[in-house]
Structures are given as structure tokens and as C-alpha cells.
Image: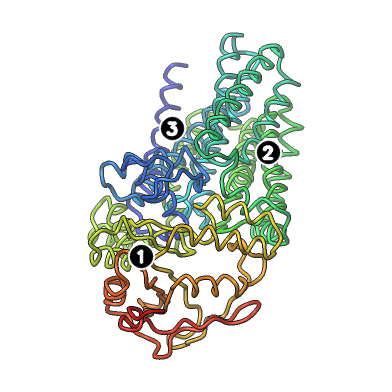
Amino acid sequence: MVRLQHIHRLYDGLILVLIAAFFLLTPLQIVVFDDAYVYFTYARNFAEGRPFAYDPRNIPSEGFTSLLYMLLLVPAELLHLNPIWISALINLCALALSMVWLGQAARATGALSGRAATIFALLLTILLLQDYNIRSLVLSGFEAILGALCVIGMVVSAAYALEERRTVRARKRWLSVFFSMTFLAHLVRPEYLLIGALGSAVLLWRSADRAVVIRRAAIFALTMLGYYLLKLAIFGDLFPTGFYRKVRVSALGVSYVQEWLSDYQNVLLLSFLALVTLVIALRRHAVWLAIWAGGAVLIVLFYTQTVPLSAVWHRFLVAPIWASYALCAFGAAWLLEVLARLSKVRAAWLAEVGRAALLCLTPLLIISKLGLSPAEVERALREEGVFNLHVRAERALRENLYLQLGWYWRSQLAEPSTLTVAYNEAGALPYALGSRFIDLYGLAEVEIAHLFSFPDSDIKTARYIAHVLAQQPSILLMLNYGEADQAVWHGFADPHSPFHSAPPAAVYEAYYAYGLRYACSVNHWGLKLHILVWRDSPQGAQTLSEAFCGHPSAYRLPNGLTVETTGGSTHFPLYDADAAAAPQ
């Protein structure tokens, strides 16, 4: 028995190594969307002595969804390490640990034999790594995979807490772990409290220690109360800005879930059949799987009532994806075990050979699914080095167009931290520029985030204008969606904007009255921006114009820029230093 336990642990270690080697060695492209840099920016400001602030204004805001993930990135910023690389390491570790944890849980609860549990973990590894969305999320800079680990922690600890073979003391300890993991999961994605609530209800129903469950739940409730009171003291708000921006009934949420259902319909059908079969066959051993599946359903229903902004790679539904694959893999491993029991061949060595063969075939199956040959992998290793994840992360950082612009502009400014820039993309640009930054779409601006809850009106417009101009922006950036030489910018409805329709003309009229004038435009490898400068800027409008318009991709529209949107149009003439100096 001891020897068998050592063999199981050996396989657990090999699975860890396999997953780590896959991401460290395989030449996967790293794509990091702009929203991931929001985490990096908060982490950098935290490291620089401005905890929970987005920029040098040092105003606390909860524009990050995951507090836990952001705090894990702070050491990287303290040590000036590549945040893309560190985030990838965090996610691949979370992925590897979750595989091992699930395999151990299947084995320890008696749901599967030791060998079948290893096969389950290997099959799940294959299913997850062949999924483009999961692979991309590991390297995305987002928190999704860390959240999946916390959900698995909830599910596994609930399984252990319900296991009657354990001592009372052990079950109590695992109840504490369950509520701790629920708290951590909530720090990654607040909606994971739904899974925690379902797990708590099942524990109360099925546990033989109900009084202990109630006491642990009461302690958890008091902890949550203290946490939210602390949030109220720091941020002046109970909810993150994303709550006001995303949590509202919208057709976008329904269409997002429908798209996910379409992409995963075959997997979902198989997982449903596996769940029904396992619940009937395993009964009490399958309770934790039912909690996981039920929690996944709650998450899907939750997102039908939201506006899922920046929902790339189905990152908000990674827990349901994980649960679906896990049920399929669990069902397959259980079926193989049943067939082995029914067969006449019961030799342990044959089962061991099968487990070892699957372990050896796993990397080949995954690589072939990616369309890569072993020769291509070998060539990438030869050209980029053995541990090329860091090389790929550095390339992703260098090739980001916003970072390139931000680094250039920062190099042209004497004191970038005193400059106030207003723009609606609160990601890579403020991370590189290091200036005071007004997020016009409210992710890092509490006042603007609250406006999402109100219908468009003159009062809402006035509040928006008052907040933006109170920060005294010296530079206003506008993303150019048209041709480079197009001198008219057309307003449009954007779900990221606090305005439910195109932004009103009154906003741009207020910008003009404030003193913003057209300085130039840039077209940096397809990234097209219009730049407006405040003629009364304390940094000097001419100085800023020269700094921002000195970029090699800069050009000027000879007649300035016209904004046409709801309620009228506003013309921003070309900034002229001599005219600006004349009495108004």
C-alpha cells in the first residue's frame, strides 16, 4: 500500500512537470488584451507606495476585479519583472495544482481507484490543454485560471468535509478550508460566492456535523462583514467599479452565453450524461461533482444578467468550462475502471502499463492537436532557448503598440507623473506613460462608474463633464476608428461607455469651452489616435504638443478635428501657439 501511494504521488509530480513543461517549452503565441494591463498598473502603483490607486493622483479605486490576483503581481513590480511572464507563471501553476488536487480528491474520496484517478487527471489535462480558450487564458494576463483553482479548492474541500471515513476533527478542518477557499475565490471573482453558497447549503444538508457547519458559516459571514467594512473605509464603496459597469440586464449577456453554449454544446451534452451516470452509480461519492456542476450552472445564469465587457476567450465562464471537461474526464475514467473490473484480465501490471502509456502519449496528443510537429517544437527551442516562455513574454511586451507609444511619450516629458491624460482605454497606455490618468469609461473612476446605473440625461451628462474637467486634463486622446486622414470623428454607442447611446455633443462642447484644441494625430502601425491639448496646461501647451506630436507616426489634419455625435457637432481647430497666447 505504501509503495502504491508513492507511485500515485510520482504520477502527480509528473503531471505537474508535464503541464509546466508544456507552457514553458511549447512556442505558443502570447496575446495580452488591454484590460490585463489594468491589473499590472494597479500592482505597479501598489509597489510604488500608492496602494489601490490607479495613477499618481493616489485616489483609491477598485477597478481591478480580483484583489488576490493583483496582490500576487505586486512582487513582480517590486522586482521590475515582466508582468506578462509572472502572470503566466501564476496561471500555469494554478492549472497544474488544480489537476493534481482533483486527481487526489477522486482517489481520496473513493470515487475512483488510484490508477483511475491518475487517468482522470491525465484526460482532464489533455482536454484542457487542447482547448484554445484555456491555453490563451493561461498566457493572457487575466485572473481566470487562478479563479478556477479556487473553485476547485471549494469543491474538493467540500468533498473531504462530507467524507464519513474521516475523523470528526479532519472534517472540521476541511470545513474551515472550504470557507477559506470560498473567501479566496470571492477575492478572484465575486460571483464565485454563488458556488460557495450552494456548497454551504449542501454541506448543511448532507453533513453529520451541522452545528459545526453553522458555526463555520457564522465565522465566514463575520469575516465577510469585516472585509466589506474595510472596503467601505478604503474605497467609500462596497462594490468594485465593474459591478456598476457590468451587472445589469442586457441582451449582450444572453448573446454571450448563447455563443458559449454553441461553442461547447457537444462537451456540455457529454458532461450532462456523465453527471447523471456518476450520480446514479456513485451516489454519495458524486455529491462534490454535483456541487461543481450546480455552481457552474449558477455562474452561467448570472452572466445572462450582465454586460460581459472584455469577455475574450470566454474568460468569465472558465469555471463552467472546467466543470464540463472534468465531468467528461471523470466519466471516461470511471467507465474504463468498470470495464476493467468486468473483464477477465485483472492484472495490476497491465493497468500500470496503461497509465504510464497515457502519461507518455499526453504531450504528443496535445502537440498534435496544436498542429505542431516535434521538429517545430525542437526548432523553437533551438532558436529561443529551452525556457522560451520568458522570451515570448518579453516579445509580447515589446510589440504592444500602446506600450510603444507610452514609452516614447514618457521619454519626451520632463515630469510625466504631473501630467493628466484623459482616455477611454485604461490599460497598457497608462502603464507605460506613468501619468495621472482619467479613465473616461469609468473602470478606474468611481464617479464615472456610478453613472452606468442612470439613464442618459442632462444631469448625467453634467456630472460626467464636471468630474472629467475637475481633474484638469492637459491631454485628451480619442481613438480614430476611421481612415487616418478622416477629419470627422463620429460618436457611437459603446457598451464600455457610461452613456447608453452615442456620447452627447454637450460633452465635446464642454471640452472646447475648457480649452482643448486639436494638436495632431498618430497612426502607429494601425493604432490611430487624435490628440487634443489644453491650451492653458501648466506643463505648457506648446511643450506638450511638441512632445506628443514628435512621434514618427504623427501628422496633422490641416483644418483640425470635428466631432459629430448625438445633439450636434463640435469643431476643434488646430492648436496654434501664437493664437493661444492672444487674449480671448
**Other residues around mark 3 within 10 Å, as few (<14) / some (14–19) / many (≥20):** many
Image point (57%, 42%), residue name: 189
The residue beneath circle 1 is: 400
Q: Assess whether mark 1 and mark 2 are in contact (beta carbons under 8 angstroms).
A: no
Question: Left or right: where does residue 66 sit relative to residue 372?
Answer: right
Please state which of residues 171 and 68 is positioned toward the viewer in this rendering.
68
Task: Answer few, some or many: residues within 10 Å of disc 1's Cα (few below 14, many 20 plus, some between 14 and 19).
Answer: some
Residue at the top extreme of this rendering: 168
Looking at the picture, which amino acid does disc 1 mark?
A: Asn
Which residue carries the number 2 mark? 295
User: Marks 2/3: CA distance?
Assistant: 26 Å
Identify the residue at horizontal 72%, vertical 48% (top origin). Answer: 301
* Secondary element type, mark 2: helix
Q: Which comes sooner in the sequence, label 2 or label 1?
A: 2
Say which of 236 and 261 sits in front: 236
N-terminal-most mark, 1 or 3: 3
Task: Give the quarter of the image for residue 409.
Answer: bottom left
Identify the element where label 3 is drawn.
helix
The outermost residue toward the front is: 583
Residue type, label 3 = Asp
The percent coordinates of residue 100 (x first, y second) are 48, 33
Which badge, 2 or 3, comes first in the chain's sequence? 3
- Image quadrant where one finds the C terminus: bottom left
The CA distance from mark 2 to mark 1 is 37 Å
Above or below residue 340? Residue 362 is: below
Is 25 left, or right, of 178 in this rendering?
A: left
Counting from the top left corner in percent of width and height, residue 276 is at 75, 39
Residue 90 location (% of width, % of height): 40, 42
Q: Picture coordinates of residue 191 (x, y %)? A: 63, 41
Question: Residue 12, which numbered label?
Answer: 3
